[in-house]
Image (tube, rainbow, N blue to C red):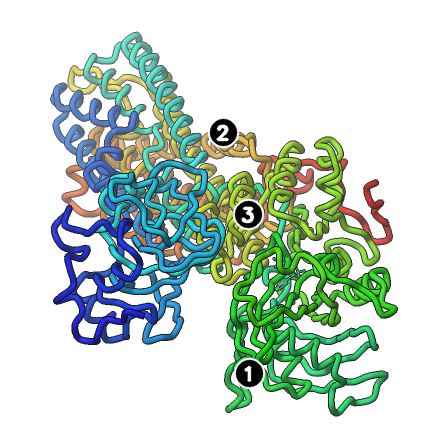
C-alpha cells in the first residue's frame, strides 16, 4: 500500500492539524490513500519513534477543559449565602453603633469562614476532578505493524486506530476500512441517532454531520468495527474547537447539599424573626437601643450554623475518596448519597460475580463425552473418556478443538517461568487452552489455516464466525456461540437430534458451566468475505465445549453482606438459564434448584406481570440489554432504588435509567462508562457492596455532624434569650447595663472556631458496626429527622443550663472581690469554657449515632483527638493571651474554675448515654428505613414458580 518512505513524512506532507485554522485539507473528500500519504502514514501505522517525535511536535491528544466555576466564582458562592450576609450586616451595624472591636471580629470571622469554606471546597472539587483520571481511556493503535493499546492522550496525527463497538472515538480520523460502523455523534452534533460511516469519500462541501468518511473525537461507536487514520488531535479536533461545550466542571451540588441549603435558609429566616422579637423584648425591658441591637445581632451570630456547608462538602469529598480507594470511582456526585439507599443491585455475572477465568472441563461430540482436567491457563491437563486417559484425540474431537481455537481472537503467552497469560476474551482463551491440552499447537494451526475474514462476537447475536483457508480449492467457515443460536443454523443428521444436544447442554449448564457449540461449513476458495447470510444455515455441528467460571470468593461474601443489609441482589446474565441458576445458587442468590427467568420469557410478559416477576426473581438468563431497561423500570415502580451494572454499548439506556448505573472499568466499553454514575476499577461485585457501605457511612456521618452542630447553635440561642428575659439589669455607675452571658465575639468563637474544628473530624468517623445490618435508608428520609431534632433539644437545654448556671455562679463569686467588669469577663469566659467542654464531651458521644462508644473504640478516629487537641490549645490562647483577651473580652480563669466547667461539661456523657440506651432498647431507627414485608427474597426450600 502506499507507504510513505520513512523519514519523508511530515516535513513534506501537506498542512496537518496544528497548522493555522482553516488550512486543514478536506479529509472527508480525499480517498484513504491520499489521506494516508498526506499525514505521512501507512496502513501498518507509525513506528514508535515517529509517534514519539510527533507527540512532542503536536502535543498530547487532550482537550483543554474550561472550568465553568473558576476560583473567583467559587469564592463568590461562599460569600453569597444568607448566613454570611446576615453576618456582614451584623458587622456593619456593630461598627455603626460604635462597637468597633465587635464589628471587626465579626468581619474577621466572616473572612476566615469564607476562606476555610473556599479552600475546603476547592480541594474537594480537585479531589473529585482527579477521579476522572482514574478511569483510563485507551485506544487500539497500529504501532510498528503491531496492534497495541495506548492511552488515548498519546495519539498523534498519522496513527492508525482500530475501532470496535463501544469505543469512544479518541480523535478526528479518516476511515480506512469499516464494517457496519455506526457512530453516535451527539457530543458534537446533538444528534443521538447513530450515523452510518463508510470509507467512500464524500463531497467536499458536505456538512459536519454528513461527512460519513470521518469519525470525530468524543463520539461513540455504537456498532460495527473499523480502522481509521488520525488527522487531528486535541484542541484541533472538531470537538476541541467547540470546547465550550465541554466546560464540564465538577458540580458539587447533590440532593443532600440542596436540602441542607434549604434548611439553612429556613433556619436563617427563623433566627431573624426571633432576633427581631428579642430586640423588642430587650427594649421593653429597658435596654439601651445600642445594647438591644447588639443582643439581636448576637443571637443571629450565635444561632446560625455557619460551619455546616463546609462540613457537608467535606463529608461528601471524603466519601468519594474512600470509595475510590475501594475501587468504585464516582462519576456523578449525587451517587454518593443514592448508594446509601440502594435496595436492589442487579449485577452481570461474568467477571463481576464470577472470576472470568474460564476453563473448559467437558467436551461433547456426536460420538461421546470427554472430560478435560487441569485448571487455569496453563495448557497442562489431559483428555479422558470414561475415566481413561485419551492419548491422541479422535478426529471429531480434534475438529471441535481446532474450530474452537481458530474461531477465536485470544492468545496464550508465556509458559517460560510456568506462568501463562491470556490476552483477549477469557471465553475464547479457554478454547485455546483446551486445544493445547489435547496436543494441538494453536499458533501453528492458525498460521496454516490463515483467517480471511471474521464476524466478531457481539452479545446480542451470541455467536462469532470466521472464514479460513483450508487448502488450494476450499475455505472453511467456523461458527461458535450459544448452543441455541448455533443449533438453529445447523443441519442435523446422522442420528443426532436437536433434543439430544440440548439435553447435553442442560446437563453441562446444570453444573454451572458455560456451554459453547461449535459448527463448520466448507465453501469454495472463491468465497472472499464473510457475511451474516453465510452462517444463517446449513452448518454441521462439531460439538460442545463446557467451561467453568467459578464465583469470586469475595462476591459470595459481598452477596451475603448485601442480604444482611436488606439489599436484594439479582443476577442478570447473557448466559444459559441452567448455568445462571447453578451459579446463582453457588452465590446464594437463590436456593439450589430454584428456577430463573429468561429474556425470552420477559419479552413475552406484559408490564404488570413483569413488575411482579422482577421483584420475586433473582436470576435472569439470556437477557438482552433492552430487557435490562424494562427490569430497572419495573423495579422502580416498586419504589426500589436500583443499582445496575453494564458493560456493553446497549447497556447504556439501562445504566442511565437505574438510580445508580455501574460500569466496568476494565472490560466495560467507553459508552457504558459515559452513561454510568460509578465505574468499578476492578470489575468486582464486592466493590459495589463496598461503595454502598461507604454511601451509608457518608450519610451517617452527616447526621452525626448535624446532631453535633445544631445543639450548640440552639444552646447558644437559649443562653442569650434566657439572659435577655431574666437577667437583672444593673445600674453601674449610673448606667443601666444588661448582664450578658456571652459577647457576640465569644459566640462567634464557639460557633465557628470550636464547632468547625470539632465537627470536621466526624466526617472521618469509621462506619458503625451495624451499618450493613440495617435496612436501606428510605430515599425520602428527611435530613432533619426526629432523632436530630430530639437530640438537639436535649443537648441544647443541658448546655444552656450548665453555662448559665456557671456564669451566674462565677459572677456572684467574683463580684465582691474584683468588681463588675472583671467579674463579668471572668463569668463570660467561664460560660464559653463550659460550652466548649460540653462540646468536647458531646463530640465523643456523637461518634456513634446511638451505639456505645466502647464498641467503636475511644481512639479509633484519631482526627477527633487532633481536633480536640487543637481546640484545647486555642481555648488556652483565648483565655490567657493578652491579645485575645482584648479582642474577645476574656479573662484568665483559676484552675479550680476550669475544672468545674470541665466537670459540668462531662454531664453530657451520662445523659446522652442514657438516651442512647433507651433508644437502643426500643430498637429505634435513627434514619428511616425502607420496609418491604411483601417482597422477601426467596427462602431456602422455597421453589420459585416459573412464570407461565
Ligand atoms: P454477563 O451478562 O453475565 O456478563 P456475558 O456478558 O458474559 O454474561 P455474553 O458475553 O453476552 O454474556 O455471552 C452470552 C452468550 O454468548 C454466552 O452464554 C455464550 O454462549 C456466548 N458467547 C460468549 N462469548 C462468546 C464468544 N467469544 N464467542 C462466541 N460465543 C460467545
> Mark 3 or 1, which is nearer the eye?
1
**Which of the two residues, 161 or 82, is positioned nearer the viewer here?**
161
From the viewer's perspective, tell me whether residue 396 is left or right of residue 792: right
Quadrant of the snapshot with the N terminus: bottom left
Residue at disc 2, secondary structure: helix
Mark 3 and mark 2 lie on one chain; the one further toward the N terminus is: 3
Asked whether residue 762 appears in the rendered view, the answer is no
Nearer the observer: mark 1 or 2; the answer is 1
In the picture, the disc for residue 694 is none
Q: In the rendered image of this protein, does residue 303 appear above or below residue 509?
A: above
Q: Which is more foreground, mark 3 or mark 2?
A: 3
Question: What is the number of the mark on residue 448?
Answer: 1
- Residue under label 3, please give it: 651
> Relative to residue 377, is residue 790 depicted above or below?
above
Quarter of the picture for ligand 1?
bottom right
Q: Say left or right for 936 vs 887.
A: right
Vertical comparison of 657 with 443: above or below: above
Residue 793 is tagged as 2
Distance Cα–Cα, label 3 vs label 1: 38 Å
Amino acid at each position: 500500500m502506499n507507504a510513505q518512505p520513512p523519514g519523508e513524512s511530515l516535513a513534506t506532507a501537506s498542512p496537518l492539524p496544528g497548522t493555522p485554522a482553516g488550512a486543514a485539507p478536506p479529509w472527508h473528500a480525499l480517498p484513504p490513500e491520499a489521506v494516508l500519504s498526506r499525514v505521512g502514514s501507512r496502513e501498518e501505522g507509525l513506528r514508535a519513534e515517529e509517534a514519539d517525535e510527533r507527540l512532542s511536535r503536536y502535543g498530547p491528544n487532550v482537550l483543554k477543559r474550561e472550568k465553568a466555576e473558576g476560583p473567583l466564582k467559587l469564592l463568590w458562592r461562599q460569600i453569597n449565602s444568607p448566613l454570611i450576609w446576615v453576618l456582614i450586616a451584623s458587622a456593619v451595624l456593630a461598627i455603626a453603633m460604635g462597637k468597633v472591636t465587635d464589628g471587626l471580629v465579626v468581619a474577621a470571622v466572616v473572612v476566615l469562614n469564607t476562606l476555610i469554606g473556599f479552600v475546603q471546597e476547592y480541594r474537594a472539587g480537585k479531589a473529585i476532578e482527579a477521579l476522572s483520571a482514574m478511569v483510563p481511556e485507551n485506544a487500539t493503535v497500529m504501532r510498528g505493524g503491531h496492534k497495541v493499546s495506548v492511552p488515548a492522550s498519546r495519539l498523534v496525527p498519522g496513527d492508525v486506530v482500530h475501532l470496535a463497538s463501544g469505543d469512544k472515538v479518541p480523535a478526528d480520523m479518516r476511515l480506512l476500512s469499516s464494517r457496519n460502523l455506526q457512530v453516535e455523534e451527539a457530543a458534537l452534533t446533538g444528534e443521538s441517532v447513530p450515523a452510518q460511516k463508510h470509507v467512500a469519500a464524500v463531497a467536499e462541501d458536505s456538512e459536519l454531520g454528513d461527512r460519513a468518511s470521518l469519525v470525530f473525537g468524543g463520539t461513540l461507536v455504537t456498532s460495527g468495527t473499523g480502522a481509521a487514520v488520525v488527522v487531528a488531535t486535541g484542541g484541533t479536533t472538531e470537538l476541541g474547537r467547540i470546547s465550550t461545550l465541554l466546560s464540564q466542571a465538577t458540580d458539587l451540588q447533590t440532593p443532600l447539599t440542596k436540602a441542607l441549603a434549604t434548611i439553612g435558609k429556613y433556619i436563617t429566616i427563623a433566627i431573624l424573626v426571633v432576633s427581631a422579637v428579642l430586640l423588642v423584648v430587650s427594649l421593653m425591658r429597658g435596654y439601651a437601643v445600642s445594647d438591644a441591637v447588639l443582643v439581636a445581632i448576637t443571637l443571629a451570630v450565635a444561632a446560625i450554623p455557619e460551619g455546616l456547608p463546609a462540613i457537608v462538602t467535606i463529608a461528601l469529598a471524603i466519601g468519594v475518596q474512600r470509595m475510590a480507594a475501594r475501587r468504585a470511582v464516582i462519576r456523578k456526585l449525587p451517587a454518593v448519597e443514592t448508594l446509601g439507599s440502594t435496595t436492589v443491585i442487579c449485577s452481570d455475572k461474568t467477571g463481576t460475580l464470577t472470576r472470568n477465568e474460564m476453563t473448559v472441563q467437558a467436551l461433547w461430540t456426536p460420538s461421546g463425552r470427554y472430560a478435560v482436567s487441569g485448571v487455569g491457563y496453563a495448557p497442562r491437563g489431559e483428555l479422558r473418556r470414561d475415566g481413561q486417559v485419551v492419548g491422541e484425540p479422535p478426529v471429531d474431537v480434534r475438529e471441535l478443538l481446532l474450530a474452537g481455537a481458530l474461531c477465536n481472537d485470544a492468545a496464550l503467552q508465556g509458559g517460560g517461568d510456568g506462568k501463562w497469560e491470556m490476552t483477549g476474551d477469557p471465553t475464547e482463551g479457554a478454547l485455546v487452552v483446551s486445544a493445547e491440552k489435547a496436543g494441538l499447537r494453536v499458533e501453528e494451526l492458525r498460521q496454516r489455516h490463515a483467517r480471511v475474514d471474521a464476524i466478531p462476537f457481539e452479545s446480542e447475536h451470541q455467536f462469532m464466525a470466521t472464514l479460513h483457508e483450508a487448502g488450494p480449492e476450499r475455505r472453511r467457515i467456523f461458527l461458535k456461540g450459544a448452543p441455541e443460536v448455533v443449533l438453529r443454523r445447523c443441519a442435523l443428521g446422522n442420528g443426532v437430534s436437536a433434543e439430544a444436544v440440548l439435553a447435553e447442554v442442560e446437563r453441562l449448564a446444570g453444573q454451572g458451566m458455560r456451554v459453547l457449540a461449535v459448527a463448520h461449513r466448507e465453501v469454495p476458495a472463491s468465497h472472499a468475505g464473510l457475511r451474516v447470510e453465510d452462517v444463517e444455515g446449513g452448518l454441521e455441528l462439531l460439538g460442545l465445549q463446557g467451561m467453568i467460571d467459578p464465583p469470586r470468593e469475595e462476591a459470595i461474601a459481598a452477596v451475603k453482606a448485601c442480604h444482611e443489609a436488606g439489599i436484594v441482589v439479582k443476577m442478570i446474565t447473557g448466559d444459559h438459564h441452567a448455568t445462571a441458576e447453578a451459579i446463582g445458587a453457588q452465590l446464594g442468590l437463590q436456593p439450589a434448584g430454584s428456577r430463573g427467568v429468561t429474556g425470552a420469557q420477559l419479552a413475552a410478559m406484559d408490564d404488570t406481570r413483569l413488575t411482579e416477576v422482577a421483584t420475586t426473581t433473582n436470576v435472569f438468563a439470556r437477557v438482552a440489554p433492552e430487557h435490562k431497561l424494562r427490569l430497572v423500570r419495573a423495579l422502580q415502580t416498586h419504589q426500589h432504588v436500583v443499582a445496575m451494572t453494564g458493560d456493553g454499548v446497549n447497556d447504556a439506556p439501562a445504566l442511565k435509567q437505574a438510580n445508580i448505573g455501574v460500569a466496568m472499568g476494565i472490560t466495560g466499553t467507553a459508552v457504558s462508562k459515559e452513561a454510568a454514575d460509578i465505574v468499578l476499577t476492578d470489575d468486582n461485585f464486592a466493590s459495589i457492596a463496598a461503595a454502598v457501605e461507604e454511601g451509608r457511612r457518608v450519610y451517617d456521618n452527616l447526621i452525626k455532624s448535624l446532631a453535633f452542630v445544631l445543639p450548640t447553635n440552639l444552646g447558644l440561642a437559649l443562653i442569650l434569650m434566657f439572659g435577655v428575659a431574666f437577667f437583672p439589669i444593673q445600674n453601674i455607675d449610673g448606667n443601666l447595663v444588661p448582664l450578658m452571658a456571652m459577647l457576640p465575639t465569644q459566640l462567634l468563637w464557639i460557633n465557628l472556631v470550636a464547632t468547625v474544628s470539632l465537627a470536621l473530624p466526624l466526617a472521618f468517623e469509621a462506619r458503625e458496626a451495624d451499618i450493613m445490618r440495617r435496612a436501606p435508608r428510605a430515599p425520602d428520609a428527611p435530613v432533619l429527622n426526629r432523632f436530630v431534632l430530639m437530640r438537639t433539644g436535649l443537648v441544647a437545654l443541658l448546655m444552656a443550663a450548665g453555662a448559665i448556671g456557671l456564669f451566674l455562679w462565677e459572677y456572684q463569686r467574683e463580684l465582691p472581690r474584683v468588681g463588675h467588669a472583671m467579674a463579668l469577663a471572668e463569668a463570660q469566659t467561664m460560660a464559653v469554657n463550659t460550652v466548649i467542654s460540653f462540646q468536647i464531651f458531646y463530640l465523643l458521644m456523637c461518634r456513634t449515632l446511638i451505639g456505645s462508644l466502647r464498641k467503636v473504640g475511644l481512639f479509633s478516629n484519631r482526627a477527633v483527638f487532633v481536633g480536640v487537641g487543637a481546640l484545647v490549645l486555642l481555648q488556652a490562647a483565648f483565655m490567657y493571651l493578652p491579645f485575645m483577651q482584648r479582642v474577645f473580652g476574656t479573662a484568665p480563669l483559676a484552675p479550680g474554675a476550669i475544672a468545674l466547667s470541665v466537670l459540668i461539661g462531662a454531664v453530657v456523657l451520662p445523659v446522652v448515654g442514657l438516651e442512647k440506651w433507651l433508644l437502643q432498647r426500643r430498637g429505634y431507627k435513627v434514619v428511616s428505613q425502607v420496609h418491604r414485608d411483601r417482597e422477601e427474597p426467596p427462602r431456602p426450600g422455597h421453589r420459585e414458580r416459573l412464570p407461565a
